Image (cartoon, rainbow, N blue to C red):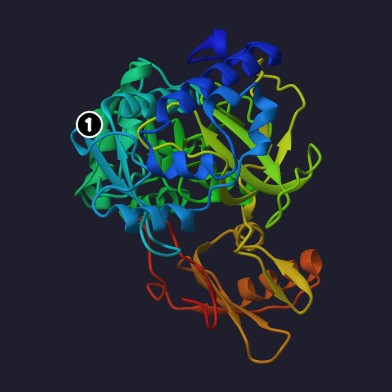
Amino acid sequence: MTFFDEAVETASRDRLRALQEERLRTLFEGLWERNRFYTDKLRAVGFEPRDFGGLDDLARLPFTTKAELVAAQAEGGRLSTNCTFPEAAYTRFHQTSGTTGEPLRVYDTPESWAWWGRCWGFVLAGAGLGPDDRILLPFSFGPFIGFWAAVGGAARVGAMMIPGGGQTSLQRLALIERLGATAMCCTPTYALRLAEVAREEGIDPATLPIRITVHAGEPGASVPATKTRIEKAWGARAYDHAGASEVGAFSFECAPQPGGIHVIESEFVVEVVEPGGDRPVAPGERGELVVTNLGRLGFPVIRYRTGDLVELDEEPCGCGRSFRRLRGGVIGRADDMVVVRGVNVYPAAVEELVRRHDGIDEFRVTVERRHEMGHLRIEIECADGLAGDAVAAAVVRTFTRELALTPEVVAVPRGTLPRFELKARRFFVEGSP
């Protein structure tokens, strides 16, 4: 078993709680009168740092939403009012991908960027990576934070980092062979795409030295059929990770892979509440993930509503860590669910059912509003040599059996559907942006 900080990861629940309370107290004291956004927000509910008595007091504080952070960005101009320090203190700029609205700009000091690297240390060590590994990062290294912090994480665990930005898929495959890369950090979509390119070049990706893949940006690595497909393609073990530009790298999957991701509770406090509501759900029940980060004083978030749907599992894990897990990873987003003919449909559930069918290289889902009940149309692109109509019919049967929903499934010619390196967008709803 590989640990990053064993004393913290295996600490008792009481010790973890005490650590969180200590770090929360430091956070409140550090931002007070310096961070205009949170000083005003907390003062409006009558809270001051001296009022903080323990973790239970967190529930007294208001939630933070992305819309509020975007408004703070507009109000502050170049530097958000959620920035605690003067501009000269910040050495890193990134922004959210903007796939669901206006990009949110985030800033990090040297201290908070080191904290990002520490969080990624948990991610990489949890997957079993260490000094003997060479990690390829086939990532564009643009303003989207993506896998930037994985560079610091690789250094923390003693692994070599191989940058793969600004290269074609063929060049990246050559790097894997030439440098003997043993691991790769990328989106689940790109892991499958790179394997597809390898096969097109007559290379079996399973013969390459990659033994571990670590994924983020999409829920695919916690979607069983997608995880299986990645592992089969590369002859490797695929690990999930979830984080957010405005929050931090808050979770990782451990080596036993019990079907969930651990929350890094030394660095984050998590709550699960009713989607759109404010009451906590019972342990194990599905709800919206709310996160407070503990190591990013320069750009903190307190009780941040992520919009992610999760189930918090409090049962002990076989890996020996006391960090709780999100069962099944991030299941979906509260605002992603659509109702089609009375059935609640989540993108991750659709991906799971489509990916169960071998030979589907890419797909696209459209919820059409032909009439009040809605209509689900799925386009699939099959590997050469497969009868697309037969595969499409099999997909229809799977959806009918599993969801009691009969979609329209159409096999389209190869090359019709787009390929992705970062976050894939495969799920569309008519009338939505």
Image quadrant assignment for residue 365: bottom right
> Is 381 positioned to the left or the right of 265 in the image?
left
- Residue 345: where, in percent of width, then height? 69, 67
Expressed as whole percent of the image width and height from the top left, the position of residue 51 reads: 60, 25
Amino acid of disc 1: Ala
Is residue 5 shown left or right of residue 422?
right
Location of residue 104 with respect to 157 vertically, above or below: below
Residue drawn where x is 64% and y is 23% of the image: 323
User: Which residue, given by chain and number where applicable, does mark 1 sit on?
Assistant: 89
Where residue 139 appears, as percent x and y from the top left, is 30, 45
Q: Residues within 10 Å of mark 1 (few under 14, many from 20)?
A: some
Residue under the point 27% across and 47% down: 79
Query: What residue appears at the point 70 percent right and 19 percent down from the top-left corner?
Result: 318
The answer to whether residue 91 is left or right of residue 45 is left
Q: Is residue 54 above or below residue 375?
A: above
Q: Is residue 24 visible?
A: yes
Q: Pick out the residue farthest to the top.
A: 7
| Residue 221 placement (x, y as % from top left) | 55, 44
Tell me the quarter of the image containing the N terminus: top right
Q: Foreground residue, 327 or 407?
A: 327
Using the rendered view, name the quadrant where residue 106 is placed: top left
